[in-house]
Image: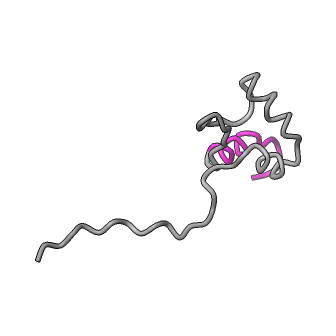
Amino acid sequence: METLPRTPSPSTDTTPQTLTPARLSERWDIPVATLAGWRYRGKGPAFLRLNGAVRYRVADVEDYEAAQLHGGIA
């Protein structure tokens, strides 16, 4: 009897890997239009355009947030 290779089971991690502009604007409490302006000017976190839809990878957002830290005691 031949054994078929196992396919990996779907991840049980329910954390989204990408954020929509609306979700990111909620996270940062800024208007969606601000994010659009930043994209136009090449500012803000890196983003993807998937089939015309803008998405932000969570890892890129977290990296951008970390880069914005100023002052204080670590």
* Left or right: residue 57 compared with residue 42: left
Q: Residue at x 68, y 38 (%)?
A: 54
Q: In the displayed image of the protein, which residue is found farthest to the bottom?
A: 1
Q: Position of residue 8 (x, y in %)?
A: 37, 66
- Residue range (magenta): 60-74
* Left or right: residue 27 compared with residue 10: right
* Left or right: residue 39 compared with residue 30: left
So how many labels did they put on this image? 0
Q: Quadrant of residue 50?
A: top right
Q: With respect to residue 31, does 12 lie above or below?
A: below
Q: Quadrant of residue 70?
A: top right
Residue closer to the observer: 13 or 61: 13
Scheme by which the image is coloured: one colour
Q: Residue at x 79, y 47 (%)?
A: 22
Residue closer to the observer: 28 or 11: 11
Q: Position of residue 58 (x, y in %)?
A: 64, 50
Q: Is residue 68 magenta?
A: yes
Q: With respect to residue 38, does 69 lie above or below?
A: below
Q: In the displayed image of the protein, which residue is found farthest to the top?
A: 41
Q: Position of residue 63 (x, y in %)?
A: 65, 44
Q: Position of residue 1 (x, y in %)?
A: 11, 77
